[in-house]
Image (spheres, rainbow, N blue to C red):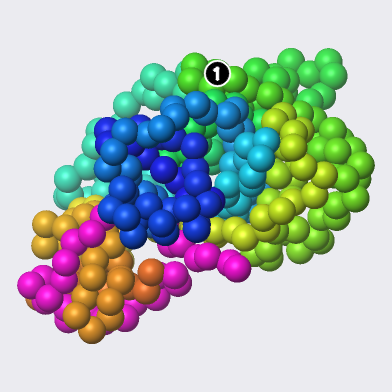
Amino acid sequence: MVPVLDENKKTLMPCSEKRARKLLEKGDAKPYWFKGEFCIILQRKPKSTYKQEVCIGIDPGSKMSALTVKSEAHTLLNVQYSAPTFIKNRVKTRAEARRSRRQRKAPYRKCRFNRNVGKRIPPSTKSRWLQHLNLIRHFSKIYPINLVAFEDIKAKTIEGARRWNKNFSPLEVGKNWFYNEVEKEYKLYLFEGFDTYTYRNSLGLKKGKDKLKISFESHCVDSWVLANQVVGGHIEPENTRLIHLKPLNFYRRQLHRHCPTKGGFRRPFGGTLSLGIKRGTLVKHQKYSLVLVGGTSNNRLSLHCLRTNKRLCQNAKIEDIKILTNYKWTLTIDN
């Protein structure tokens, strides 16, 4: 199913690939790429603005998660995405670098009392829940999503313990923040893990054992079951195609390298701009076609593969590229 937007880029009900092709041939619609997702924009007033209930089901995981966008009639989209697992090490490295700068003559932030103790969510925890929330908002811009089905997860608590309880666990704090944010914009349905297991078995579906494998059976089968439980309409998945998303790993600006080179010289490192272009931007190059912008050196750009983020070259000229849109992840389509 192809997402459809009106002239003001407001979401309408998706249409089939055949109907989208006919609209493009007649000139009643024009193609539109939204962060790697193909859509069409109507060039006339829609015949009907009726919208079915569309649910996004999410199956969270520690390293890999999945979501499914589904209506009663069709499975619109299946997405499997990797969790941002590098945040914890980044925060630790930042703290170590800050401490080391205090011991020598270098610019540093003075040590101060942490005023956010007990009032904030740990960065590694918030990044995971923020990823779920951002993806819901992202796909709501091209699909008329109004329902969210989520598999509730719980931290192990100890009865009688003073500190280790639901208010202390970062997992519980993070998910409560996420639920509050979702309920501001959507209607939220929560399911326990054994509920998902029961619904999946009742439909005769099986979940794969390899949780890191990019396939519908790894995680999307659970997200599909959750969405189908809310909107109904099917007894088996009619669309098992999926998209795999992996967040791009940007190196933020640092004052200098942690380990100096010969002579004690520390060159600048990191940043999110390359010759004025934001890193992760999708561009079209004369030789490499669709690629992502990486770092810069000697007034040249490094270009990376769209699917694997592997570096292709380091000497691309800025006049040889055409800027298309900004990316936050690598995208792979699994047929």
Q: Quadrant of residue 310?
A: bottom left
Is residue 256 found left or right of 82 in the rendered image? left
Identify the residue at horizontal 37%, vertical 39% (top origin). Answer: 5
Give the position of the C terminus as an image quadrant: bottom right
**The magenta segment:** 307-335
Identify the residue at horizontal 46%, vertical 62% (top origin). Answer: 331
- Determine crowd level at label 1: few under 14, some 14-19, many 20+ residues with C-alpha closer than 10 A: few
Is residue 299 found left or right of 249 in the rendered image? left
The amino acid beneath tag 1 is Glu
Identify the residue at horizontal 82%, vertical 44% (top origin). Answer: 235
Is residue 67 covered in magenta?
no
Q: Is residue 138 visible?
A: no
Q: Is residue 120 above or below residue 279?
A: above
Number of marks in the image?
Answer: 1
Q: Is residue 333 above or below residue 78?
A: below
| Pick the front one: 230 or 299 | 230
Is residue 43 found left or right of 241 in the rendered image? left
Q: Quadrant of residue 248?
A: bottom left
- Residue 313: image location, x then y, percent: 26, 81
- Residue 213: image location, x then y, percent: 68, 65
- Residue 183: image location, x then y, percent: 55, 18
Q: Is residue 186 visible?
A: yes
- Residue 281: image location, x then y, percent: 26, 59
**Dominant secondary structure of the magenta stretch?**
strand
Residue located beneath label 1 in the image: 183
Identify the residue at horizontal 68%, vertical 24% (top origin). Answer: 189
| Pick the front one: 248 or 142 | 142
| Pick the front one: 259 or 49 | 49
- Give the SS element for disc 1: helix
